[in-house]
Amino acid sequence: MFKLDTIISLAKRRGFVFQSSEIYGGINGCWDYGPLGVELLLNIKDAWWKAMTFRDDIEGVDASILMHPKVWEASGHITQFSDPMIDNKTSKARHRADNLIEDFIAKLRKKNKNDIADDCEQKLTKAQDPADFYKIIMDFQIPDPVSGTTDWTDVRNFNLMFKTFLGPLDDTSSTIYLRPESAQGIFVNFKNVMESGRQKVPFGIAQIGKAFRNEINTKNFLFRTREFEQMEMQYFVKPGDEKEWFDYWKEMRWNWYIQYGMKPERLKWKLHDKLAHYANHAIDIEFEFPFGFGEIEGIHSRTDFDLKAHQALSGKKLEYVDTVTKDRFVPYVIETSGGVSRGLMAFLCNAYDEEEPTTEEEKGEKRVVLRFHPKLAPVQVAVFPLVNKDGMPEKAHAIYKDLQKNFKVQYDTSGAIGRRYRRQDEIGTPYCITIDGDSLVNNTVTIRERDSMKQELINIDNIKSYLFDKFAL
RNA sequence: GCGGGAAUAGCUCAGUUGGUAGAGCAUUAGCUUCCCAAGCUGAGGGCCGCGGGUUCGAGUCCCGUUUCCCGCUCCA
């Protein structure tokens, strides 16, 4: 396992990821994608988009990031998407107030003080405002697990939604939010998409877009950031069919990662034991990052919570009517929700490899290779003249310009041929084409494959069909 | 948010008791080179994260701050 620092260093050096606003000292947890990073990002999104929408039963949307404030009222984000936090003045430890109380209740039960535990639990379920939590903590004299004291600050609510203002007035009547998840953009468009797309249940709606959460901490490079991109698909099914579709999408999503080269031993399932308010079943796909396993995608059974909530608050019917059976119902939803940046980081970590020289003759240092799946590689082909004279550069450049019509290509004449191969290895280019002396007389080139480093002699006229074949999925 | 570490060229790092900034690699212009990174000759690139302070003088000492990494905490 390679260190995260090694990956970050390569990402910066070769133009995958830069710190945002770097010349001003950077800004916490914000990152910019460079020339190669954006290609990789687009390739990942493209692969996902095609896997989702090149089907009969899934349509795409791209909803606005700013939405009507009632959306977040219906979804439960205004009331639920916030954490009551409390600090201990002695230890300076910060806790979630509700977790602190829950842990306290658990301890009471261990000591068989069930009367007090019941009383406390009853008050906890009724607690809503920060002041309610504070009262419980003080009434029961709940101590800080770290310092043992009850020297607490007030409980403060940290809402994770970014606030901004619609229009010029900086007051509460114009408060709106940056969406904390992209899913609601799909739910509110459920009817529009179903009708305009002439879809019947079961069907899905896919979307790729940014979402924002004002997290208390950012962490681990791209893994936890306040601005992030999601690729999400909500699949609408008949109530009762959700288990079957959950299993279907669970398998589909796992296989998608495998198909694009993710090593199975670095993936694992993580079942949610604590479910969110909207879900009745949820599982994550986790990838083994240098800092441990972390979620890259969630598959959730969201029931009819969201559609029902929007139906109730908007007063608009969000039902599906089966024209044959005359059945009428609010569909259940299976969601697949992947993080684009997390996916990129996982594909990057998954692809990174170093090879030590195997023989004495091999000069040079270790070989750094990004073993991307060809479909994801930011640069697909590189073209080199073997030496920079004798008509080879002209021939090579002509081939380069021609390939550029169909592929992302780089042209490189600088340095020894081995060095140029290594440059391409380090950015994960799967194929390098070299024009040598024979090219000019026999009309042939060598194609060198990244992982095996094997070379193949092929006719110049066959380059494109060779590559199309290799890049076809 | 707490604790620890770090910040000097694109990258990895030197930089003595405080005295006007260095190496290797990378980049770039040529030469050389018929297949897997260190051949030859040049060139560019740094207010030493940022802001204060001490000092005749600060990359170096002090304070603050920002950012990243590691470990906790947190992650409806």
Image: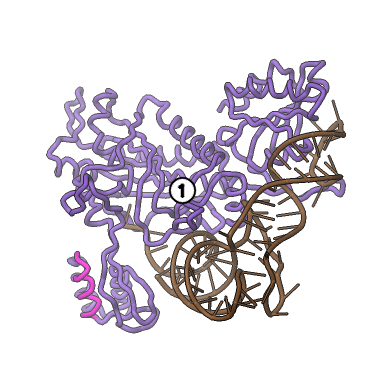
Q: Chain of mark 1?
A: A
Q: What span is colored magenta in the figure?
A: A128-140
Tell me how many marks there are.
1
- The brown one among the chains is B
Q: Main secondary structure of the magenta part?
A: helix
Name the secondary structure under disc 1.
strand
Where residue A78 appears, x then y in whole percent? 23, 54
| Residue located beneath label 1 in the image | A296
Give the residue drawn at x 24%, y 49%: A165
- Based on the displayed image, in which of its 4 quarters is residue A3 positioned? bottom right
| A232 versus A286 height, above or below | above
- The purple one among the chains is A
The image quadrant where one finds the N terminus of chain A is: bottom right
The image quadrant where one finds the C terminus of chain A is: top right
Give amino acid for label 1.
Answer: Ile
Residue closer to the observer: A112 or A100: A100
Q: Residue furthest bottom?
A: A149
